Image (cartoon, rainbow, N blue to C red):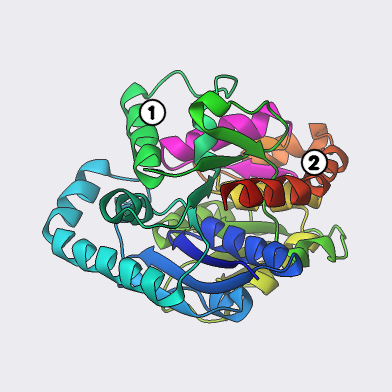
Amino acid sequence: MKKVLFLVQGEGRGHLTQAISMSQTLRDSGYQIVAALVGGAVERPIPAFFYDQIQAPVEAFSSPNLVFNTEGKVDFKKTIVHHLPNTIHFGKSLKQINQAVKRYKPDLIVNFYEILGGLYNWLYRPPVPMVCVGHQYLFFHSDFPTPKEGYIDHFLVNFNSRLTALGAKKMLALSFDALSDQPSKQVYVVSPLLRHDVHSLVISQKEYILIYLNHPALYGQILEWHLKHPEVALHCFWSKSDALPEEKIDETLTLHRLDGAKFLEKLAGCKALVTTAGFESVCEAMYLDKPVMVVPIHYEQACNAADTERVGAGVTAKRFDLSVLMDYLPQHQPVGENFRQWCREGKKQWLAHFESAV
């Protein structure tokens, strides 16, 4: 039985849910997940759903994370300034990763876009192959439609992606649809990683809009729109650390603490999804034939937003003005059938890439 160790970037829920899905696929194919090491800010705990579903020992370590301004937008300058004094902690994290690799003796390391994973692979040169997984690696693909504006941001995102994949055998690029592999760039296009729970959901369409916020500061925009349109029912999941499991603001606005199973249940029954252009959430919505409105808060998500519109999954907005979604809904055409077929083809692809790496 081959042993696999996961390194997971813990910012948001996307990479965490990808790791859960991958653990399920590998376990079904006879692999053992020996541990999942999750990087992130110390003050932001790993969500409970990850502990519940990964079915492997979980270790947290300090890792660089994005810093947001008061409007919920990423502030790259503040991000750099914030992390400069913490470099000594990141050095300790690299040692922690190395100790875990020695202790668990994996046959393969799968890195879900964790920057310290790439730096560890480059500095420590472990005798274990590393494969990197992430939608961001698709940005290296010559056919991917990146936004024309934001050249500096484009460079920074790709530079960060390179750091996560230092010394990796392959970069497995998650994509909404099939694009050709580009082996010369070590880029291999694969279908998205969806949790097994998604496949068994009963789809319905009720009248509420589902919202996912990866930063609490964005809630103000939701509340502003809600007060003007109280007739529209909203269920909002947010990542506030001290949030109640469920908080009913009024008759048509309910807040929920981040909960993977509950989120999927609400997604299966919603009219549409509103989110910050995170790849994983859009994929789940596409699979369930739910139109989306995406509001990118940094360049990486702007790329996701452009791709979301390219494949017909939904519409992009500059802020959480849900009127943009309401105007879009009558013209939306379902894309779920083609997307589900692409996902069904994925398991053999994934296993073939892992077997070749080991």
Instruction: Describe the element under mark 2 as helix, strand or loop.
Output: helix
- The range drawn in magenta is 289-312
163 left or right, relative to 179: left
Q: Which mark is residue 187?
A: none
Q: Quadrant of residue 28?
A: bottom right
**Residue occupied by mark 2:** 342
Residue 196 seen in the figure: yes
Name the quarter where the N terminus is drawn: bottom right
- Above or below, comparing residue 194 to residue 37 in the picture: above
Q: Residue shown at 88%/65% (left/top)?
A: 202
- Above or below, comparing residue 89 to residue 115 in the picture: below
Q: CA distance from mark 1 to mark 2?
A: 28 Å
- Above or below, comparing residue 268 to residue 181 in the picture: below
Q: Residue shown at 51%/49% (left/top)?
A: 131
**Residue occupied by mark 1:** 154
219 left or right, relative to 26: left
What kind of residue is marked 2? Trp
Q: Position of residue 208 (x, y in %)?
A: 74, 60
What kind of residue is marked 1? His
Q: Residues within 10 Å of mark 2 (few under 14, many from 20)?
A: some
Instruction: Describe the element under mark 1 as helix, strand or loop.
Output: helix
- Above or below, comparing residue 199 to residue 75 in the picture: below
Residue 249 seen in the figure: no
Q: Nearer the viewer, residue 323 or 91?
A: 91
Q: Is residue 295 magenta?
A: yes
Q: Residue farthest to the left?
A: 85
Q: Position of residue 326 (x, y in %)?
A: 71, 41
Q: Residue shown at 57%/53% (left/top)?
A: 358
Q: Residues within 10 Å of mark 1 (few under 14, many from 20)?
A: some
First along the sequence among labels 1 and 2? 1
Q: Nearer the viewer, residue 23 or 274?
A: 23
Q: Position of residue 275 (x, y in %)?
A: 58, 50
